């Protein structure tokens, strides 16, 4: 079909609506751009690719509407396929951990968050489906009579009159201009079911039978022990004989029922009744997936409204009414659908040390609170056939294999009386208390950090206490320098008069190029941090954003922080990188100070950072930070009696687009590791820094 001009036709796309399979697109843009997969991802480079893609569409007057997957299929008929894919991702991540390239791709942990945030910043209309998106995409395309862009083979089967544009033939990087005019277009290839059926002389109604017989995500006859030799109906030889034979055999039928009955008669000849019943059920489910019910997406894009509860399938009505529109806007995590409907979550996979416990284990306590909020206040009036549950089954990596265990849902003390139906009406102070209690961070600890960075700093405090093995000081320093780098990139992109260029270029010069070595211990530490960040973003969203949501593209750059760890372990110091950037240095110290304050609150009773009596505490709280404590000791904050006891101003609670340095009197000064004689900026006596 790739080479058949009667099926895939060359077209020039311009001045058109375009429905885009978003989940397929962010896979394509990340993998086809050759971006890092082994070091946790380079989100800023991915954002750049997304921006270039939609600029190409805009230049050709193409109006995109992006639709991403939500939760799993509520019928659960793809469960075996999902497990196979999860094991495949584990295998690919393990290959990358050994330095093997070309073994398939592993997407970074935060890729979907970044993709949705970039779409929002570009004002590209997008929707997150409640469950899987394929049927809704096809239904909207049929309603609007516009093409679909994807690489999902199911779109070769859906009856979409305006056709399907395979992304492998969508040359968005080669925008062309029509001769004799200024009209721009994107060269691509268009597929329609009409051209396919005309070429193979079959009725369009039997295409779903064709897909189900070959095998899709819902049915695979060979896994049921059913084998049919379609090659006997083909005059071709080689790998396409099976496809050609099945198409020749289907050419005699005018409708689905007739074709399905004949298939079952073929199956019963060589198989028992039990196999035939299983095959009939599987084929029926596979065929049903190509039926297109009315979609709620049209009303969402036109009127900004979510699906009415009465328009949802019965199992989905377990979702509280208030969650439906935020789910479609992508401002609530889609994993909540799997928790509420299936009581199950399939964890992601990253490149990490396969001999150590899965990095997702570190963030499990955060997920337990998420589960508690979702399951602890289930809708009492909902007539679900599923019994109430207090546990969620998690699938994750153990060694090099996919495994699962039951995880208890937990409610923190601040949330014991909360119900999911009214969670969005809870006082903001209560929502914030639940979030901070979960991460073990106080509000005052974060007061000196810019509002848009408080969440990642809180996550870092949590990560330092829970990571296993515990990260050493260079790993923490490199992570914070990476946050400084991201903030500088964000500032330069959004604001004129940028003055921190030397620091930015110094950090940029450390980014690894070409073939990159991999320290599995560092990869494992940062994999845990990203897992903690992802789950904290989900919890923050469910609690209606008590902390400002950060722009995730600027929070982590794997090819920089890994190289920074190597350099810092070799003797490089943060101050040598931050020379000439007073704002950068102050941001770095503000974040480090918050982390040290949090460390003091949790660890002063165990191994004090300053002199004082030790108090008894539970040994499980001491282990994660024991190795880091000695290094942090020289960075501890000490009292500054000269400044008096006057309280300092707090950063404004509202979100801000940037931060501006303001001198604030405080009781503390920073005893940091910067060599003051090498940097006069840091030798001056300065108060704690606030942002406004």
Image: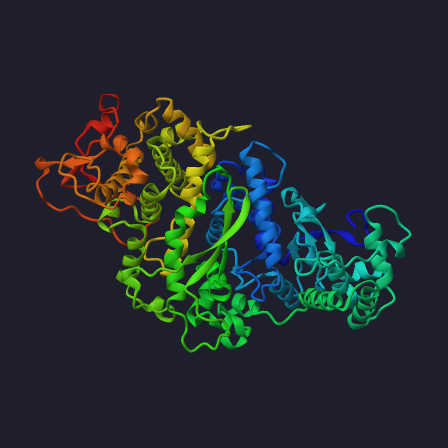
**Residue 18 higher or lower than 458, as above or below:** below
Q: Is residue 136 left or right of residue 310?
A: right
**Residue 525 higher or lower than 366, as above or below:** above
Residue 73 location (% of width, % of height): 57, 63
Residue 343 location (% of width, % of height): 48, 63
In this view, the residue in front, 278 or 533, is 278
Can I make out residue 248 in this image? yes
Quarter assignment of residue 263: bottom right
In this view, the residue in front, 380 or 453, is 380
Q: Report the number of numbered marks.
A: 0
Q: Residue at x 57, y 51 (%)?
A: 58
In this view, the residue in front, 228 or 549, is 228
In the image as oriented, which residue stretches furthest toward the right?
235
Q: Is residue 77 left or right of residue 666?
A: right
| Figure coloring | rainbow
Quarter assignment of residue 502: top left
Can I make out residue 587 in this image? no
Q: Residue at x 71, y 56 (%)?
A: 223
Quarter assignment of residue 229: bottom right
Residue 614 location (% of width, % of height): 16, 39
Residue 409 location (% of width, % of height): 39, 60
In this view, the residue in front, 351 or 276, is 276
Q: Is residue 495 left or right of residue 50?
A: left
């Amino acid at each position: 079909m790739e080479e058949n001009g009667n099926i895939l036709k060359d077209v020039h796309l311009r001045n058109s609506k375009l429905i885009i399979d978003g989940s397929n697109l962010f896979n394509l843009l990340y993998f086809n751009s050759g971006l890092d997969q082994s070091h946790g991802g380079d989100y800023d480079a991915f954002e750049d690719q997304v921006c270039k893609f939609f600029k190409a569409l805009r230049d050709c007057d193409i109006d995109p509407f992006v639709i991403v997957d939500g939760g799993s299929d509520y019928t659960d008929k793809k469960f075996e396929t999902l497990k196979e894919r999860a094991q495949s991702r584990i295998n690919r991540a393990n290959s990358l951990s050994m330095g093997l390239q070309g073994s398939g791709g592993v997407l970074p942990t935060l890729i979907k968050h970044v993709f949705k945030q970039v779409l929002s910043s570009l004002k590209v209309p997008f929707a997150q489906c409640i469950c899987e998106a394929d049927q809704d995409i096809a239904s909207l395309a049929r309603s609007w009579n516009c093409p679909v862009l994807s690489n999902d083979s199911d779109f070769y089967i859906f009856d979409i009159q305006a056709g399907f544009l395979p992304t492998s033939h969508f040359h968005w990087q080669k925008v062309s201009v029509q001769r004799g005019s200024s009209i721009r277009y994107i060269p691509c290839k268009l597929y329609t079911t009409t051209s396919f059926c005309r070429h193979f002389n079959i009725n369009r109604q039997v295409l779903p039978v064709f897909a189900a017989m070959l095998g899709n995500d819902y049915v695979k006859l060979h896994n049921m022990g059913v084998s049919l030799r379609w090659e006997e109906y083909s005059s071709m030889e080689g790998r396409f004989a099976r496809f050609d034979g099945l198409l020749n055999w289907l050419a005699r039928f005018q409708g689905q029922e007739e074709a399905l009955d004949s298939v079952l008669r073929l199956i019963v000849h060589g198989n028992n009744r039990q196999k035939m019943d299983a095959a009939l059920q599987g084929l029926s489910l596979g065929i049903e997936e190509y039926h297109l019910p009315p979609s709620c997406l049209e009303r969402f894009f036109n009127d900004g409204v979510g699906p009415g509860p009465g328009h949802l399938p019965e199992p989905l009505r377990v979702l509280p009414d208030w969650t439906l529109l935020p789910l479609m806007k992508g401002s609530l995590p889609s994993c909540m659908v799997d928790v509420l409907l299936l009581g199950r979550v399939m964890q992601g996979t990253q490149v990490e040390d396969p001999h150590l416990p899965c990095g997702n284990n570190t963030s499990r306590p955060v997920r337990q609170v998420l589960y508690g909020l979702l399951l602890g206040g289930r809708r009492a009036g909902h007539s679900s056939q599923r019994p109430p549950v207090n546990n969620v089954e998690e699938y994750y990596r153990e060694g090099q294999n996919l495994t699962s265990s039951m995880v208890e849902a937990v409610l923190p003390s601040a949330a014991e009386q909360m119900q999911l139906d009214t969670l969005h009406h809870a006082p903001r102070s209560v929502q914030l208390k639940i979030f901070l209690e979960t991460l073990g961070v106080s509000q005052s600890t974060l007061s000196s950090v810019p509002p848009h960075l408080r969440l990642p700093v809180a996550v870092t405090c949590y990560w330092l206490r829970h990571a296993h093995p515990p990260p050493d000081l260079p790993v923490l320093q490199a992570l914070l320098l990476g946050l400084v780098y991201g903030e500088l990139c964000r500032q330069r992109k959004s604001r004129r008069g940028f003055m921190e260029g030397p620091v930015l270029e110094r950090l940029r010069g450390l980014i690894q190029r070409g073939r990159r070595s991999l320290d599995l211990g560092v990869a494992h530490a940062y994999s845990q941090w990203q897992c903690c960040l992802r789950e904290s973003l989900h919890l923050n969203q469910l609690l209606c954003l008590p902390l400002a949501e950060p722009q995730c593209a600027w929070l982590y750059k794997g090819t920089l922080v890994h190289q920074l760890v190597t350099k810092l372990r070799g003797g490089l110091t943060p101050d040598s990188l931050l020379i000439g950037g007073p704002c950068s240095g102050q941001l770095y110290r503000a974040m480090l100070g918050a982390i040290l304050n949090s460390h003091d609150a949790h660890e002063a009773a165990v191994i004090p950072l300053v002199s004082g009596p030790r108090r008894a505490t539970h040994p499980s709280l001491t282990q994660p930070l024991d190795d880091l404590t000695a290094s942090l000791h020289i960075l501890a904050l000490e009292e500054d009696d000269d400044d008096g006891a006057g309280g300092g101003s707090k950063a404004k609670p509202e979100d801000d687009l940037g931060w501006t340095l303001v001198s604030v009197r405080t009781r503390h000064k920073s005893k940091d590791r910067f060599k003051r004689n090498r940097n006069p900026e840091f030798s001056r006596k300065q108060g704690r820094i606030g942002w406004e």
